[in-house]
């Protein structure tokens, strides 16, 4: 039976809440601690360790497991602050612990010794590329040769995903929405494993994977490493995967106590094998007698943001029923919902306004996809505002823009300054961007020939096109030759030159063909479109544009590290916080992100909701949310980016801000907008919390405004496939046909109580229509 001392027996000299004190007072038995964002969980863990050491638990019998190296270093510093001039227990990441166990298993002869350091991506990529070529048929092999990144990146991710659990590679593949030609990934996994074992190498994932698989195959060896710890403490437990959970089970070995701490609402690494289920259900199920604690108080942000975060995340089902409460010490966090016609311009304005009051380093722009980042980065470069980038490459260094640099170089008459090797490499890039579905060997031979040419490049390319090519293949190369010839004339503006290349070569279609991931496709396409818009607004000649871009690139390279506003993604923002957070793209396309042609399920929607929850709870003093302005476009001209996100409605921003404003003014009547439904059932509990902080909640009176009359609308039933919308590589699911009075016939993709998504016949894109507006014009054929 778990035991813990009453909270009053724990010293509160460090300012711990009663809930934190209860965790610190837990002296025996397994414990599960659910902590909201900013709840001070590592502070609680540090005081817990201090209390156990003071109680007499030997340091060597306490093991602390952190999610990554940064968290490990930060926690070591915090623990040394709590326990000054004292030794501290072993604090490790799962991977460093796995490597230590690996070495012990080598010493025992249970695992073979490995050579060198763990494999880097730079070492793994060429081997995976070579194996893919060996496994593919002739047609697929040509695509692999020409589109290395397209194939290697998902193949490496597949290998890592297999090693996050125990499912066979075939089962893992079947769980993913990859095209049939990627089925070679299954055999690739086995061949890659054979290669690395023959060469006695391990990858980062193998630090844990190999020891755990050894323990599973040899329980008698696992017993040697089991049960040595009196306490095992696991931070960020919501991010654990099956392999790590199994390692934890081995180390526990049925002896001692395990305490895990985390937040299922912040489970955002599913692509690495994590699931909310581990902390919500599985830990209790596996460990048996578990004492559960909650740390509901956030020390990061104020009531407005807590109310919005609670409204949003309570729409999820796979979670712990915890209510986030802002501690009395939190700042009075301000929240603003902006409606923008062009978000990058508004983002720049917000950064400039905030920079008048604080250092740029206090501001973070958190993006759902990197696709949203490119236009903001270009705007910052043009404005001379320094910035930090969590992505590996600046927008001006991106692969998809390299062809534009080459075209501007040709138009400026500088191409012939390259030496032969550089010209050959540049020609091959022109010939393969986008890839024209010609054997790579033919294109390489053509590049070698053209590299000898100093001028009249377009004409030379026309003459060099092999007669052996098909008419369609010749047209692909002739279109490029025509653009090069026009570039050499020098009369086109930079924008016209680049736009002609995009149009004549069907560059965007080539980008779509060059990746399997819808996110990667969108990232590249939006980067290209943002760059073209930037060039159009410059309105300069090719020569002047090239000079200006070089100036911006040099400016970026000379910027001091770790200075300026931060541009980051939600996944990279996890575990961090800033005084000011800006979240662009709060529209129906990005929140929840539903790329056209991919599955949307209830589980993926909960995951998307968690992502927004994590992003918004990074803010301390100011949160800016950017949503689309009301559009005057016709339904035919709108896309999902023009419509507000349903998460916007779920957050009930207007209701939360009105509630806090009314309370700050001493109370009064609040008329509830029926659009947001009835008052959430948890609101009275939050009002009780506010009352304990001295706010006059008893003076509040809630009334429901009369609903606006709606036009009579047709009954809309969910599609027969249960709400799954569409699949990039379709199976045999049925479809629901629709007829729109103006837009014609199409296929119902998805719907909720606010929007209907339809792909109309003859259109590639999916239209998002308001149900209220479209209901009278739609007929459904089931």
Image (cartoon, rainbow, N blue to C red):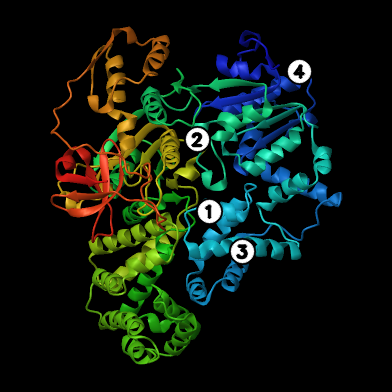
- Numbered badge on residue 188: 3
Measuring 64% from the left and 12% from the top, which residue is drawn there?
11
Q: Which of label 2 and label 4 is nearer to you? A: 2
Task: Point out the tag, 2 or 4, that comes first from the N-terminus.
Answer: 4
Question: Which residue, given by chain and number where applicable, does mark 1 sit on?
Answer: 174
Circle 2: element type: helix
Q: Is 127 left, or right, of 704 in this rendering?
A: right
Q: Which of label 4 and label 1 is nearer to you? A: 1
Above or below for 759 versus 66:
below
Above or below for 491 versus 184:
below
Q: How many marks?
A: 4
Residue 554 or residue 618, whichever sits in front: 618
Residue 508 seen in the current view: yes
Residue 781 or residue 400, whichever sits in front: 781
Task: Point out the tag, 1 or 3, that comes first from the N-terminus.
Answer: 1
**Few, some or many residues within 10 Å of mark 1 (<14, 14–19, 20+):** few
Estimate the spatial distance between the alpha carbons at disc 3 and disc 4, rounded to whole Å: 53 Å
Measuring 50% from the left and 35% from the top, which residue is drawn there?
266
Task: Point out the tag, 4 or 1, that comes first from the N-terminus.
Answer: 4
- Numbered badge on residue 266: 2
Estimate the spatial distance between the alpha carbons at disc 4 and disc 1, rounded to whole Å: 51 Å
Contact (Cβ within 8 Å) of mark 3 with mark 4: no
Task: Point out the tag, 3 or 2, that comes first from the N-terminus.
Answer: 3
Q: Is 215 left, or right, of 356 in this rendering?
A: right
Circle 4: element type: helix
Estimate the spatial distance between the alpha carbons at disc 3 and disc 2, rounded to whole Å: 33 Å
Question: Which residue, given by chain and number where applicable, does mark 4 sit on?
Answer: 55
Residue 564 seen in the current view: no
Q: Quadrant of residue 538?
A: bottom left
């Amino acid at each position: 039976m778990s035991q813990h001392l009453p909270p009053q027996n724990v010293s509160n000299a460090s300012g711990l809440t009663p809930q934190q004190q209860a965790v610190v007072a837990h002296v025996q038995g397994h414990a599960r601690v659910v902590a909201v964002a900013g709840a001070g969980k590592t502070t609680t863990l540090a005081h817990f360790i201090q209390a156990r050491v003071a109680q007499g638990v030997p340091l060597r019998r306490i093991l602390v497991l952190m999610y990554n190296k940064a968290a490990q270093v930060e926690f070591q510093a915090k623990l040394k602050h709590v326990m000054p001039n004292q030794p501290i227990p072993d604090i490790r990441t799962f991977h460093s612990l796995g490597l230590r166990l690996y070495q012990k298993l080598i010493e025992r002869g249970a695992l073979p010794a490995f050579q060198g350091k763990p494999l880097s991506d730079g070492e793994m990529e060429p081997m995976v590329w070579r194996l893919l070529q060996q496994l593919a048929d002739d047609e697929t092999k040509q695509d692999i040769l020409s589109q290395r990144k397209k194939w290697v990146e998902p193949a490496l991710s597949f290998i890592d995903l297999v090693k996050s659990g125990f499912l066979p590679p075939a089962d893992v593949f079947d769980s993913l929405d990859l095209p049939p030609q990627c089925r070679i990934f299954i055999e690739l996994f086995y061949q890659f494993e054979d290669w690395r074992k023959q060469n006695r190498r391990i990858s980062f994932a193998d630090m844990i994977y190999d020891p755990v698989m050894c323990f599973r195959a040899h329980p008698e060896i696992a017993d040697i490493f089991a049960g040595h710890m009196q306490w095992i403490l696991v931070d960020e437990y919501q991010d654990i995967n099956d392999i790590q959970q199994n390692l934890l089970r081995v180390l526990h070995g049925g002896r001692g106590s395990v305490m895990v701490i985390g937040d299922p609402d912040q489970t955002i690494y599913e692509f690495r094998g994590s699931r909310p289920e581990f902390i919500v259900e599985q830990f209790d199920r596996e460990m048996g007698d578990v004492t559960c604690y909650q740390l509901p108080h956030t020390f990061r942000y104020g009531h407005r943001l807590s109310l919005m975060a609670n409204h949003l995340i309570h729409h999820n089902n796979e979670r712990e029923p915890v209510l986030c409460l802002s501690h009395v010490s939190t700042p009075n966090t301000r929240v603003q919902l902006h409606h923008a016609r062009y978000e990058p311009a508004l983002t720049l304005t917000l950064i400039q306004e905030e920079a008048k009051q604080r250092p740029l380093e206090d501001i973070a722009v958190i993006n759902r996809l990197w696709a949203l980042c490119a236009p903001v980065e270009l705007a910052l470069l043009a404005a001379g505002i320094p910035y930090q980038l969590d992505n590996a490459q600046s927008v001006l260094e991106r692969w998809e823009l390299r062809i534009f640099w080459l075209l501007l170089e040709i138009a400026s008459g500088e191409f012939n300054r390259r030496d032969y090797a550089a010209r050959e490499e540049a020609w091959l890039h022109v010939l393969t961007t986008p890839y024209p579905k010609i054997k790579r060997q033919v294109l390489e031979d053509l590049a070698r020939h053209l590299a000898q040419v100093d001028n009249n490049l377009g004409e030379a390319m026309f003459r060099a096109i092999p007669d052996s090519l098909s008419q369609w293949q010749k047209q692909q190369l002739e279109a490029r030759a025509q653009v090069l010839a026009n570039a050499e004339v020098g009369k086109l503006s930079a924008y016209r030159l680049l736009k002609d290349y995009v149009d004549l070569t069907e560059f965007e279609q080539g980008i779509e063909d060059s990746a399997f991931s819808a996110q990667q496709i969108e990232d590249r396409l939006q980067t290209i479109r943002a760059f073209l818009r930037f060039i159009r607004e410059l309105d300069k000649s090719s020569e002047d544009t090239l000079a200006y871009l070089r100036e911006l690139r040099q400016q970026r390279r000379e910027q001091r590290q770790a200075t300026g506003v931060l541009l980051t993604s939600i996944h990279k923002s996890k575990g961090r916080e800033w005084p000011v957070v800006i979240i662009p793209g709060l529209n129906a396309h990005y929140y929840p992100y539903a790329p056209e042609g991919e599955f949307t399920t209830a589980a993926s929607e909960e995951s998307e909701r968690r992502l927004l929850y994590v992003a918004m709870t990074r803010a301390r003093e100011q949160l800016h949310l950017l949503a689309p302005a009301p559009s005057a476009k016709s339904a035919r001209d709108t896309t999902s980016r023009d419509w507000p996100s349903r998460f916007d409605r779920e957050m009930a921003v207007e209701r939360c801000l009105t509630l806090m404003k009314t309370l700050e003014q001493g109370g009064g009547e609040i008329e509830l907008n029926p659009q947001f439904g009835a008052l959430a059932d948890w609101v009275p509990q939050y009002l009780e919390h506010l009352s304990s902080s001295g706010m006059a909640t008893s003076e509040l009176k809630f009334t429901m405004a009369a609903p606006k009359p709606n036009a009579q609308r047709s009954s809309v039933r969910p599609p027969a496939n249960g709400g799954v919308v569409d699949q990039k590589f379709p199976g045999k699911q049925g479809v629901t046909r629709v007829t729109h009075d103006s837009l014609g016939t199409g296929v119902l993709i998805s719907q909720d109580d606010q929007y209907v998504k339809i792909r109309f016949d003859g259109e590639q894109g999916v239209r998002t229509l308001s149900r209220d507006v479209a209901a009278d014009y739609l007929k459904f054929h089931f």
